[in-house]
Image (cartoon, rainbow, N blue to C red):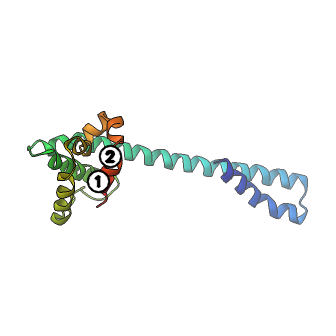
């Protein structure tokens, strides 16, 4: 943020220095540059805060909806896939993607199920969002195996 402010001020002050502007004009330009830089910085911070808030809301919604999607039974891979699809739908909805409906691709689901099924049960559990969040340290050791499954 400080770099952006410095660059903005420099860009606004450089023409005045080259033309030999008076001290009063330079001071006025300096004040304008500082105000502009602060305004830009505030706008960027506000946008970043808003984006972080939207992402947090999408994650919370996905976490709430994932157990409901997985409640139909099935194995760990089914539960993981259902949770992932619910998270994608919630994020899509939060980010302005309409109703948040996600069309399932049967080929991708089959590929996910095949890769997930090949994993040991303790690694499969880490694909379930609620489990992974509660057991972050444990699941971290399986990161490479998990990324191979999610790399669809």
- According to the picture, the residue beneath numbered tag 2 turns out to be 58
**Residue at the far top in the pictured view:** 134
CB atoms of marks 2 and 1 within 8 Å: yes
Q: How many dots with numbers?
A: 2
Tell me if residue 135 comes above or below residue 65 in the rendering.
Answer: above
Q: How far is disc 2 from disc 1 in space, using C-alphas?
A: 8 Å
Tell me if residue 73 comes above or below residue 89 in the rendering.
Answer: above
Q: Which of 132 and 119 is in front in this view?
A: 119
Q: Nearer the viewer, residue 56 or 18?
A: 56
Mark 2 surroundings within 10 Å by alpha-carbon count, few (fewer than 14), some (14 through 19), many (20 or more): many
The disc at residue 93 is 1
Does residue 108 appear to the left or right of 55 in the view shown?
A: left
Residue 27 percent coordinates (x, y) = 83, 50
Locate residue 131: give its quadrant: top left
Does residue 150 appear to the left or right of 8 in the view shown?
A: left
Mark 1 surroundings within 10 Å by alpha-carbon count, few (fewer than 14), some (14 through 19), many (20 or more): some
Does residue 152 appear to the left or right of 106 in the view shown?
A: right
Residue 112 percent coordinates (x, y) = 21, 57
Residue 12 percent coordinates (x, y) = 75, 59
**Residue at the far left in the pictured view:** 73
Mark 2 vs mark 1: which is more N-terminal?
2
Q: What element carries label 1?
A: helix
Q: Tell me what residue is drawn at x 66 percent, y 53 percent.
A: 4
Q: Quadrant of the C terminus?
A: bottom left
Q: Nearer the viewer, residue 103 or 73?
A: 73
Residue 49 percent coordinates (x, y) = 48, 44
Does residue 111 appear to the left or right of 59 in the view shown?
A: left
Q: Tell me what residue is drawn at x 81 percent, y 61 percent.
A: 14
Q: Tell me what residue is drawn at x 79 percent, y 54 percent.
A: 29
Q: Is mark 2 on a helix, strand or loop?
A: helix
């Amino acid at each position: 943020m400080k770099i952006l402010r410095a660059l903005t001020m420099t860009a606004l002050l450089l023409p005045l220095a080259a033309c030999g502007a008076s001290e009063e004009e330079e001071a006025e330009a300096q004040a304008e540059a500082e105000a502009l830089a602060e305004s830009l910085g505030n706008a960027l911070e506000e946008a970043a805060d808003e984006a972080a808030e939207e992402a947090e809301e999408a994650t919370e919604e996905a976490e709430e909806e994932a157990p409901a999607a997985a409640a139909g039974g099935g194995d760990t891979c089914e539960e993981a896939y259902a949770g992932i699809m619910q998270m994608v739908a919630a994020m899509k909805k939060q980010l302005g993607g309409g109703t948040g409906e996600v069309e399932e691709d049967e080929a991708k689901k089959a590929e996910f199920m095949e890769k997930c099924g090949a994993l040991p049960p303790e690694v499969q559990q880490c694909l379930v969002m609620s489990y992974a969040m509660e057991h972050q340290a444990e699941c971290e050791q399986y990161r490479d195996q998990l990324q191979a499954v999610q790399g669809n």
